[in-house]
Amino acid sequence: MDAEEVQRRLRALTDRAEIADLMSRYLRSLDERVFDEAWVRAFHTEDVVAEMPIGTVRGQDALLDHIRRGMALFDRTVHLGTDTVIEIDGDRATARGAQLSTHVLAERPEDGSENVFVSGGHTHTELVRTPAGWRIRATALRVVWTQGTPPRLPA
């Protein structure tokens, strides 16, 4: 193995580690609940497209507003991501994985049922390398099952 091949492999491993770290930090940040301009810039490109169960948004400002409103429905959350498959092609990458999200509702359901809502699904994320590091350019969460009472969405 020559020096060029070593450099190529090292770059691939470094990229993979940086992307895995970004994805883990993103899920953790949802539970830490600090959603400001620094948060959205730390994870997303300016032209991000995010497809979530409560709608699709485009751009950092729209995403930030969407996340703030969505997460306000919950008192506490735990988001877990696993089985992530990362594929890198130069300055672009995809990350596909599974996500399990547990939510404690901010409002107890009127029927007195449990205030815990759990969802499981699959994520597909497109990332790009920027001067600031890897960022999410597009992401989709496809929920495949739920348990419990979902939150009541505001009109």
Image: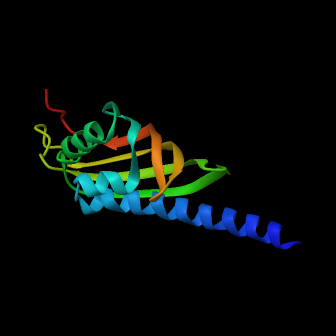
Q: Is residue 118 left or right of residue 154?
A: right
Query: Residue at 23% of width from left, 58% of height from top?
Result: 33
User: What residue sits 58% from the left and 56% below the top?
Assistant: 83
Residue at screen point 23% across, 54% down = 35
Q: Nearer the viewer, residue 114 or 13?
A: 13
Tell me where residue 82 appears, x and y as whole percent.
53, 57
Q: Residue furthest right?
A: 1
Residue nearest the viewer, comparing 146 with 67: 67
The answer to whether residue 149 is visible is no
x, y percentage for residue 22? 46, 60
| Colour scheme of the picture | rainbow
Q: Position of residue 13 (x, y in %)?
A: 67, 66
| Picture residue at 44% right of the left edge, 59% below the top | 132
Quadrant location, the N terminus: bottom right
User: Residue 32's spot in the image, x, y percent?
Assistant: 26, 63
Q: Is residue 139 visible?
A: yes
Quarter assignment of residue 56: top left
Q: Quadrant of the C terminus?
A: top left
